[in-house]
Image (spheres, rainbow, N blue to C red):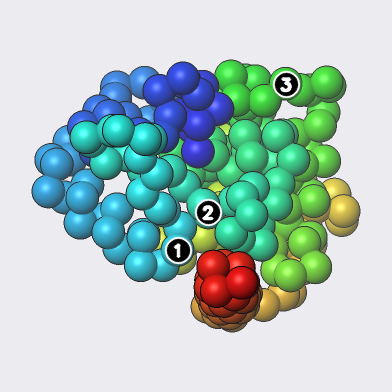
């Protein structure tokens, strides 16, 4: 997602470029040291879950990969540029305060107003199909609460903020919605339906081509 936005000329990514992106020293927390077999194993797993697809250009000798996790014709997750920036930063760096996101998201998406970050977080937390982010309980010594993405399970040591937290406006409290498992099941079901429709369309096209040749 990050490289699709920041280096579109080098996207989709070869496996070597993907390894370098995973291990880069900036805009990452924690820093990683992944080898090529590990990255390939993960890419294959994401491909089976329909989050990544191989996308090599004509005549390319090197396989290249692109994400179909969001904002593509293959999936149901559609985000605004600002929502994409927030989600991407939370995936790259872990839980962050709105202030940290205000400083980091502009490299991925233009912010017409700094306060839009709070609006984006509130929107992502109140999605009708289930919250994608949640506000964490404010830690001692911190002025603001951090926010975390919900595409993976939160560590047991992390505490989600309650609705009566005095720091949180009521508008940004995460509502009760489908669980992550239910959300993933919905996405998988929709992707399966799309795949079936594409296969059916391909059959119709093939049948039409056969009839044209016979005619």
Q: Residue 161: image x %, image y %?
A: 65, 59
65 lies left or right of 189: left
Q: Secondary structure at mark 2?
A: loop
Residue bearing the label numbered 3: 110
The quarter of the picture where the C terminus appears is bottom right
Q: Residue 177: image x %, image y %?
A: 72, 75
Q: Residue 137: image x %, image y %?
A: 61, 53
Circle 2 Cα neighbour tier, 10 Å, few/some/many (<14 / 14–19 / ≥20)? many
Q: Secondary structure at mark 3?
A: loop
84 lies left or right of 38: right
Q: CA distance from mark 1 to mark 3?
A: 29 Å
**Does 163 sit above or below residue 11?**
below
Question: In percent of the image, x 72 and y 21: which residue is there?
Answer: 110
Per the rendering, the mark at residue 50 is 1
- Depth check, front residue: 7 or 90: 7
Q: Secondary structure at mark 1?
A: loop
**Does 162 sit above or below residue 139?**
below
Q: Residue 27: image x %, image y %?
A: 42, 25
Is residue 69 in view from this perspective? Answer: yes
Is residue 166 in view from this perspective? Answer: no
Residue bearing the label numbered 2: 69
């Amino acid at each position: 997602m990050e490289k699709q936005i920041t280096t579109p000329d080098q996207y989709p990514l070869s496996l070597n470029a993907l390894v370098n992106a995973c291990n880069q020293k900036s805009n990452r927390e924690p820093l990683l040291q992944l080898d090529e077999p590990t990255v390939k194993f993960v890419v294959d797993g994401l491909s089976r879950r329909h989050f990544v697809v191989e996308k090599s250009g004509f005549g390319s000798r090197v396989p290249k990969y692109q994400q179909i996790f969001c904002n593509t014709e293959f999936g149901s997750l559609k985000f605004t540029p600002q929502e994409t920036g927030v989600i991407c930063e939370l995936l790259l760096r872990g839980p962050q305060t709105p202030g940290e996101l205000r400083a980091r998201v502009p490299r991925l998406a233009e912010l017409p107003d700094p306060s839009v970050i709070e609006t984006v977080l509130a929107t992502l937390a109140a999605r009708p199909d289930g919250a994608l982010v949640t506000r964490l309980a404010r830690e001692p010594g911190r002025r603001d609460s951090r926010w975390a993405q919900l595409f993976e399970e939160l560590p047991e040591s992390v505490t989600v903020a309650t609705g009566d937290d005095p720091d949180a406006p009521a508008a940004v409290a995460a509502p009760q919605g489908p669980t992550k498992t239910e959300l993933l099941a919905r996405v998988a079901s929709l992707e399966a339906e799309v795949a079936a429709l594409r296969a059916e369309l391909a059959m119709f096209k093939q049948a039409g081509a056969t009839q044209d040749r016979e005619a």
